[in-house]
Image: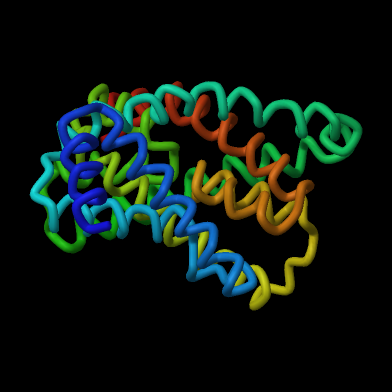
Amino acid sequence: MRDDFFRLWVYLSTTPLLGLTLTLVAYQIGLWLARRSSNHPLVNPVLVAMLVVAATLAATEVSYQQYFEGAQFVHFLLGTATVALGLPFYERLAELRASWRSLVSGLVCGSVAATATVYGLAKYLGVSEATARSLLPKSVTAPIAMGISEAIGGVPALSAVFAILTGVLGAATGKIVFDLLGIKSMMVRGFALGAQAHGIGTARAYLVSADAGAFAGLALGLHGLMASLVLPWVVRWIL
């Protein structure tokens, strides 16, 4: 049995299948733990998968580059998955037409508040200008955040890390914050999660409610578009 496992590991570790297999297995572990905990916010499947992948790579001394040779196949499908978020939103167009002013206002106010507070806090703590700028797109999904960061003089790799941490934190604490504020509308909860915790928050919203997931997907896309257009202008003319 041990010999069979060893031969399987040797085969996987020398092919792109390693990254793909490890990613899928790690996420399945995350989903299993989340279901066992009745989808507790702190047991986020993405967070669990990240920890499993990181621990496995560290224990086996496999480089990230070697891992990504296989994981890039899942990475490629992110675009397809993002586009697919438009279907449940399309099914709720009537709700959007009735609430679009409130949603747009909330998106703009939330984006301004998140960006201004994180930049102000970063400067207050004395971090470098490049790091402070890397924090600005933290609430936008990681691929878009990296592109924005490069355009505004930040560090794309740092922006990706900040975006992922923001998504995990938002998905883990969103329910607590909403309950404390007395927010019960699934539309509002989902839109807020998508706007501030991007893809990870959207995944969490879908676990809770299809309505929350649909509006989280809408917020994810709108915030990414708005940040791409506005943040470079803000940095150039204001900062």
- Residue 116 appears left or right of 34: left
Q: How many marks?
A: 0
- Of 77 and 26, nearer the camera is 26
- Residue 32 appears left or right of 54: right
Residue 174 at x, y = what percent? 57, 64
Residue drawn at point x = 38 percent, y = 25 percent: 73
Q: How is the image coloured?
A: rainbow
- Of 83 and 110, nearer the camera is 83
- Of 147 and 143, nearer the camera is 143
Residue drawn at point x = 44 percent, y = 53 percent: 46
Residue drawn at point x = 16 percent, y = 31 percent: 14
Residue 112 at x, y = what percent? 48, 45
Whether residue 177 is visible to the viewer of this picture, yes or no, is no
- Residue 1 appears left or right of 190: left
Q: In which quarter of the image is the C terminus?
A: top left
Q: In which quarter of the image is residue 47?
A: bottom left
Residue 148 at x, y = what percent? 33, 27
Q: Which residue lies furthest to the bottom in this view?
A: 180
Residue 117 at x, y = what percent? 38, 56
Residue drawn at point x = 33 percent, y = 44 percent: 22
Q: Is residue 192 above or below residue 15?
A: below
